[in-house]
Amino acid sequence: MELLKSASLLFVLLNPFLMSIYLMTLIRELAFRDFWAVMLRAHLISVVVFIVFAIAGERIFEEVFKVRFASFLIFGGIIFLLIGVRSVFSGKIVLFETRGDPEHLAGAVAMPFMIAPGTISASVLVGASLPPVHSAVAVALAVAASLCSIVLFKCLHDPLVTRHERLLNRYVEIIGRVVAIFTGTYAIEMIVRGCEVLFLTA
């Protein structure tokens, strides 16, 4: 029960629906085979990173990187704030160059959309509530569910775009602006939370 609860927490923070909006350029321009390769590599990169943080916890920041976790929250918030501000005015998020090998695109997908302060924090929380093996299983389940959801969105998108391209483009633009507002709000929340931790521990 605790394993499924932890996996659900990470899956919600990965939020494949919102990620699909951010990855719309790739969804539109890549063939299914190339898209699958990019998503698989990105999710494999992410699951390794999440498992490491689940097992190591906050010690990895203090002992390996010699930084406070609050600093990581603030920097991550700034990144998402820049993405949100840019996107709320354009209505779309074009952050990817679709030329190149799938492994290069996979790194851009994994960071910062999957490997982000929120998901890393969730991984640390998963590791604190479960034994190491169970933590790894919970992380793997959440990432696998995210991969399946995004690939399913791609399968639904391709037939629709040939029939209702204008309607779909308009829908994506509206959703993109709405998502950008929440992205900016979440970014401010991360920055404020990081500042609070810094002041409390100062």
Image (spheres, rainbow, N blue to C red):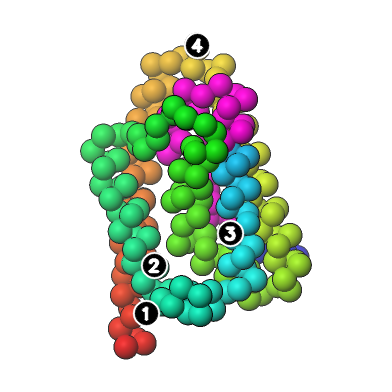
Q: Residues within 10 Å of mark 1 (few under 14, many from 20)?
A: some
| Residue, disc 3 | 49
Q: How many marks?
A: 4
Image-based side of 12 in relation to 170, left or right: right
> In the depicted view, which residue is nearer to us: 176 or 109?
109
- In the rendered structure, which disc, 1 or 4, sits on the residue that comes first in sequence? 4
The amino acid at mark 2 is Leu
Residues at marks 1 and 4, CA–CA distance in whole angstroms: 51 Å
- In the rendered structure, which disc, 3 or 2, sits on the residue that comes first in sequence? 3
| Residue, disc 2 | 73
Residues at marks 3 and 1, CA–CA distance in whole angstroms: 24 Å
Q: Residues within 10 Å of mark 2 (few under 14, many from 20)?
A: many
The amino acid at mark 3 is Val
Q: Residues within 10 Å of mark 4 (few under 14, many from 20)?
A: few
Q: Secondary structure at mark 4?
A: helix
Mark whose residue sits in front, 2 or 4 = 2
Tag 1 and tag 4, C-beta contact below 8 Å: no
Label drawn at residue 197? 1
- In the rendered structure, which disc, 2 or 4, sits on the residue that comes first in sequence? 2
The amino acid at mark 1 is Val
- Give the x, y percent position of residue 68: 41, 77
Tag 1 and tag 2, C-beta contact below 8 Å: yes
Residue located 30% across and 40% down the image: 87
Eyeballing the image, is 37 above or below 6? above
| Residue, disc 4 | 163
Tag 4 and tag 3, C-beta contact below 8 Å: no
User: Which secondary structure type mostly characterizes the magenta part of the structure?
Assistant: helix
Viewer can see residue 175: no
Residues at marks 3 and 2, CA–CA distance in whole angstroms: 17 Å
Image-based side of 183 in relation to 155, left or right: left
Residue range (magenta): 9-38
The amino acid at mark 4 is Arg
